[in-house]
Amino acid sequence: MSKDLSVPPEIPKEDGRPKWDNKFQYILSCIGFAVGLGNVWRFPYLCQIHGGGAFLIPYFIALLFEGIPLLHLELALGQCLRKGSIGAWNTISPYLGGVGIGSWMVSVLVSLYYNTVLTWVMWYFTNSFQEPLPWSVCPLNENRTGLNEECYKSTAVNYFWYRKTLNITPDVTETGTLQWWLILCLATCWAIVYLCTIRGIETTGKAIYVTAIFPYLVLTIFLIHGLTLPGATDGLAYLFTPNLNTLKNPRVWLDAATQIFFSLSLAFGGLIAFSSYNPPKNDCEKDAVTVAIVNSVTSLYASIPVFSVLGFKATTGYWDCLDRNIINVINEFDLPEESIMRQNYTAWISYLNSSHPEKIAGLKLKSCDLQEFLDQSVSGTGLAFIIFTQAIILMPGSQAWAILFFVMLFSLGLSSMFGNIEGVFTPLLELRIISKSIPKELLSGIICLISFLITLCFTLGSGSYWIDIFDSYAGSVPLLVIAFFEVIGVAYVYKMKRFSKDVKWMTGRKPNLYWQITWRFISPLLLLIVFVAFVTLQIQKPASYAAWNPKYVCSQIFSKLLIKARLVYFSPLPHPLKSLSSTAYLHNAYSVRTTSVTGALMNT
Amino acid sequence: MMSFHEISDVLLCNVTDRVSFWFVVTDSSQNMTTVPGSVVEAAIRMNRNRINSAFLLSDKTLQFLKITSTLSPPVEPSTPVWLIVFGVVLCLIVAGIVFLVVAGIQQRKKKNKESTERENLEEKGEVTVTVENGIPCEALDLKAGHINGVFAADDERFTSL
């Protein structure tokens, strides 16, 4: 009898803690937090470069042994202790308070630069209402005799991104000036974040209905449209054709583990904050499994339209290449119009090469290979702002597609921002340094205002380099370390028996063998291996970063990053430079090389 | 110098299957001498549009070698379109923020007023407010009941029949 009465001290009473309106809101918030930009622009890229369908094997193994256990752990923790990250970890053990503070700091840093990406999305969105789209044409030069030189040497899309949007400086040491258009968009983005998080989950709970569901609608529309485009099947076949040989490369397993980890937004403290607003008697085990599976299914679902569109773009590029060659040949040999078509192009070329080899050589025809166009793989901002925008120009009705696409990206990013902001907001509310009389609206307003002022530095000419640095070093390794200590802390400091009892009280059943084994042994071990592998790979190469230099001449330039007080001098992971340089459409003048370390921004 | 030319003054040669040809313009008034190339070039440059529309072609499909077409500048509206869109979005957001803040302030004022009223009434002893566990009964009715999770979901406490 005494066993029934010995409930944990957190009896539900009117403790004034805000609550979710209903369970669906909570699940939707967790899903919105987990499903972010990385599901659209990182997962399909990884699938493509790591052997297509074969990548799903390490991906699902990582999900099973790392993603779901850690997710369940965080949700159960928050629900049981009913506090944000700092309070929760202080409760577990005063020696583990640092884990909470670490989570909080990471949330702060990631919130800062994540909103700048939304700024870029908003800028593109407001520019999508023009006819023609501003990134489809090159502006003229001063005396109107030709196109702007920088634009002509690369492409209109690249020019719009690097010059019109970022106004990027050639070097991170050259700060450049504040770009007023980006400041306006940044202010708008922070205003939107403030509007949605003004009263904590009371307002984000309403906003999440739109921002979490809308991306799925748009993805479906793009899926239907993408499958009707020519060349879509080439793209999809290229994406999903499994190549099991890639599994021998440890890089693939590392990428799968990090992708799962960052994609589920673990160790940010946001999930703990979300579940702390739950009623304590809630089945967190089912929630964790649901959120993880929905996140992975969304990644797969998003990769279909993305790769249909990429296949379409590759096919169109291939056809353009062929058409240019055909025109040149027809002009040179004065053949009748439409004598050479795409289908008989190779036959004609071989015939002409045998009869007039000097003429053909003199034409300097570019070799057109569909595979080469399909190989131009890119992830991250390059995919959204360069590749996809180029593909959208080729579709009829491009304004509508552009608007839809950028609103979708904005919703995806915004719902992840809610989780980040909650991870910052909730612990602050619980710390006694903030007096109770300050209304929540004022506190969230102050946070948003301070963040806006700090993020003004990302609107400088060198701002995107700084975002790369933040993403590579603030949003990657610290999360792994925090997650490792989370699992160790709960399993061995709080003790698994006690935790199992708490979970049993909350869900009504004892966590089964799968949870026990993963929490105690497999997940910590996996995290340790991933961390060591990550660091090892980084140390092997000197640090480098992307540079867009209008005066670049063909020689490799590697600049050393300034060593900052808190950043450690790490090196990026090796990256297939070939695929990246071809996406920059090199014309012997411009080069773009990106750092290979990708952190939370690219993966979340 | 205005001189009129007939169609018969334009001589073609080297016509190919590709529909490309060389042509010269002769001046019948001056004893069949050819008009200098620069004059012809200047004339074509000025009348490019008329020539194109006569053939229902464009600068791209009807090429005159060595005569590059001047590029038309891209259309630029007086106010950049993006500023207009941006203004609309910003106005909506600011309206939303103001609305929420004002609603929050009003709610807080109402709550303060209610609690001071209740305190005054209790002091005067005129109205007994039935209170259960610190929650006034009226509030309970309005909220349509609280479900105490400890007791509701705990099936173990009830012995099965």
Image (cartoon, rainbow, N blue to C red):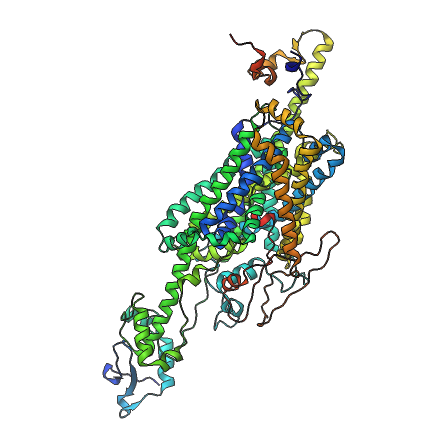
From the viewer's perspective, tell me whether residue B2 is left or right of residue A101: left
The image quarter in which residue A96 lies: top right
Which residue sits furthest bottom?
A: B31
Q: Compared with residue B144, is residue B161 higher up or lower down, i.e. above or below?
A: above
Picture coordinates of residue B5, whole percent (x, y): 27, 83
| Image point (28%, 87%), residue name | B26
Picture coordinates of residue A236, whole percent (x, y): 40, 51
| Image point (38%, 65%), residue name | A320
Q: Is residue A459 visible?
A: no
The image quarter in which residue A552 lies: bottom right
Near-viewer residue (A131 or A426)? A426
Count the numbered circles shown. 0
Near-viewer residue (A15 or A104)? A104
Q: Is residue A546 visible?
A: yes
| Image point (43%, 73%), residue name | B70
Picture coordinates of residue A526, whole percent (x, y): 61, 43
Picture coordinates of residue A253, whole percent (x, y): 55, 49
From the viewer's perspective, tell me whether residue A265 is left or right of residue A316: right
Q: Compared with residue A414, is residue A327 higher up or lower down, i.e. above or below?
A: below
Which residue sits furthest left?
A: B8
The image quarter in which residue A564 lies: bottom right
Near-viewer residue (A276 or A398)? A276
From the viewer's perspective, tell me whether residue A175 is left or right of residue A32: right
Q: Compared with residue A204, is residue B83 higher up or lower down, i.e. above or below?
A: below
* The N terminus of chain B - image quarter: bottom left
